[in-house]
Image (tube, helix red, strand yellow):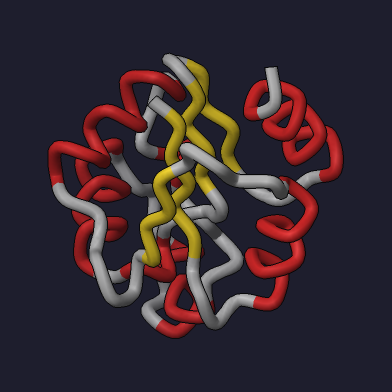
């Protein structure tokens, strides 16, 4: 299975999707219009090893809610990601049991290689 979770209004996601092309056979899920389900998030967490690894500390709500001053548990990360799409670090690329999270050059390059094998 090849799937990319992304945010359509995010310029970084748009740039990365262009970089990952061609995307034939890849399912795209725009997380604002089609929120991540608990089952999808659980699958991502199993592949990545934790909910924290999927959590974006760059989300504006992270500071606005004072979450940067709290010690968060795995359950907290899970609930927050399900509650609001901006808490999911993006994009998340799934390729046949592998997961690539975020927008670092190294991660995007590894995802591109995996997608086009």
* Residue 9 placement, left or right of 48: right
Residue drawn at 72 percent across, 46 percent down: 20
Residue 27: x and y in percent read 40, 46
Residue drawn at 43 percent across, 40 percent down: 3
Residue 112: x and y in percent read 73, 33
* Residue 110 placement, left or right of 95: right
Q: Quadrant of residue 82?
A: bottom left
Q: Nearer the viewer, residue 75 or 107?
A: 107
Q: How many marks?
A: 0
92 shown above or below 97 = below
- Residue sitting farthest toward the right: 105
Residue drawn at 41 percent across, 62 percent down: 87
* Residue 18 placement, left or right of 96: right
77 shown above or below 115 = below
Residue drawn at 64 percent across, 64 percent down: 13
In the rendered image, which quarter contains the N terminus? top left
In the rendered image, which quarter contains the C terminus? top right
Q: Nearer the viewer, residue 52 or 107?
A: 107
Residue 108: x and y in percent read 75, 40
Q: Nearer the viewer, residue 113 or 78?
A: 113
Q: Nearer the viewer, residue 25 or 73?
A: 25
- Residue sitting farthest toward the left: 38
59 shown above or below 27 = below
Q: Quadrant of residue 66?
A: bottom left
């Amino acid at each position: 299975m090849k799937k990319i979770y992304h945010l359509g209004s995010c310029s970084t996601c748009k740039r990365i999707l262009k970089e990952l092309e061609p995307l034939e056979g890849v399912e795209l899920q725009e997380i604002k219009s089609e929120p991540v389900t608990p089952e999808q998030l659980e699958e991502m967490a199993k592949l990545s090893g934790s909910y924290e690894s999927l959590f974006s500390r760059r989300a504006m709500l992270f500071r606005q809610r004072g979450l940067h001053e709290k010690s968060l548990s795995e359950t907290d990360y899970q609930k927050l990601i399900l509650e609001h799409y901006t808490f999911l670090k993006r994009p998340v690329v799934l390729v046949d049991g592998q997961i690539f999270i975020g927008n670092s050059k190294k991660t995007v390059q590894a995802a591109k290689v995996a997608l086009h094998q």
